[in-house]
Amino acid sequence: MLQTAEVTQGKTAASGAALVGLATAVPPHQLDQADVIDHARRIFGSRTGLFETLEPVYTNARIERRWSAMPLAWFEGPADMPEKTRLYERHATDLAEEAALAGLRDAGLAPKDVDVLIFVSSTGISTPSIEARLMNRLAFRPDVARLPIFGYGCAGGALGLSRAAQMLAGRPGAVCLLLVVELCTLAFRHDSLTKSNLVATALFGDGAAAAVLRGTGAGESGGGSIGRLGAGGEHLWPGTLNVMGWKVDPEGFDVIFHRDIPQIVAGDYRAALDGFMTRAGLTPADIERPCCHPGGAKVLDALETVFDLPPQGLDAEREVLSDYGNMSAPTVLFVLDNLRQRGARGAHLVTALGPGFTAAFQMVDLQ
């Protein structure tokens, strides 16, 4: 079993934050999985015998389509880190703008109403950061408190909610706009003939989500909002830096995926979850439903077992995976929005796994 290091913030009703707006956005290019398989076969098939072995991954992923900032033709040739950085800066800012406007519209607010602006992303590097670029497009106040966050990977959506709640603690009425944007497809490596790279080409898509939160005072119920944030926490297993992440070189980001991630979830996630719930004063009866990051079909199988759900029980997660692929950090917020659109109510555990190796937990009571 893995060792643990962990932290939990707050109790179920103590975060002082209500979720008042939620929206998602995708870039313009739809990639159908059948077309992706044909392109991948053409790019990799004659260069490595590994592709023939791994080709079933594309169908076993249970992904029908994904969305990309770049058309399929772009993936036919190599691109270095400077080119990918230029593309990231342009397209991440565009997608952040679309998501921000949609999220604020959902909340009935405008950019001038925002007091805190958090930007979460791990698929590109930009200084000035993307939210600073966005402030030159939209009419945010110049005194907005900004927090760019890099490195959370797939856990960024859940941990972004937790950081937003922490920044709103003790600030009733303050508004936080959380933007989570990932352009995973820019990590495509034409030069890398590794199993991890080929698996990534079968899974990754691009997307963005915006969550608008408002600080609430003591005793406020957050009525009239989408939901209220409760306890948040995280759990890091030391000695697991090789499980998930990036290897950076002149050609860009090269993905690190440990083949045993589903087995780690099946064997070690439950203890981390139990520890979080104990520290937060929660029991399984307090959770209406988990809201999981759908990292892949095998990970969802493992999570259904952990949460004592029937096969296919994480239906919203599987629907998002099928329609969007693994977009890293925003994906779990796509699931939360899917559940909201279905009319889900009650306490939901937003949870995801990211580099570190880290499990993220955030309670959201949908209303």
Image (cartoon, rainbow, N blue to C red):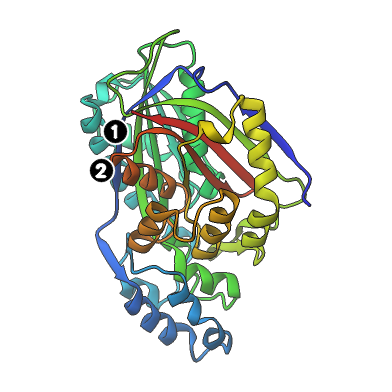
Q: Is residue 25 left or right of residue 196?
A: left
The residue furthest top is: 218
Please tell me the numbered disc located at residue 136.
1
Q: What x and y, as percent, mark residue 244?
A: 62, 56
Callout 1 crowding tier (Cα within 10 Å): few <14, some 14–19, many ≥20:
few
Q: What x and y, as percent, mark residue 286?
A: 52, 31
Residue 140 in sight from this viewpoint: yes
Cα distance between the residues tagged 2 and 1: 14 Å
Three-letter amino acid code at disc 2?
Glu
In the image, residue 22 above or below residue 255: above
Q: Nearer the viewer, mark 2 or mark 1?
A: 2
**Image quadrant where one finds the C terminus:** top left
Q: Is residue 7 left or right of residue 361?
A: right
Q: Which residue is mark 2?
A: 98
User: What residue lies at 60% left-to-right and 24% top-to-bottom?
Assistant: 9
User: What residue lies at 43% left-to-right and 46% top-to-bottom?
Assistant: 332
In the image, residue 101 above or below residue 18: below
Element at label 1: loop
**Of label 2 and label 1, which has the lower sequence position?**
2
Residue 93 in sight from this viewpoint: no
In the image, residue 274 above or below residue 229: below
Three-letter amino acid code at disc 1?
Asn
Please tell me the numbered disc located at residue 298.
none
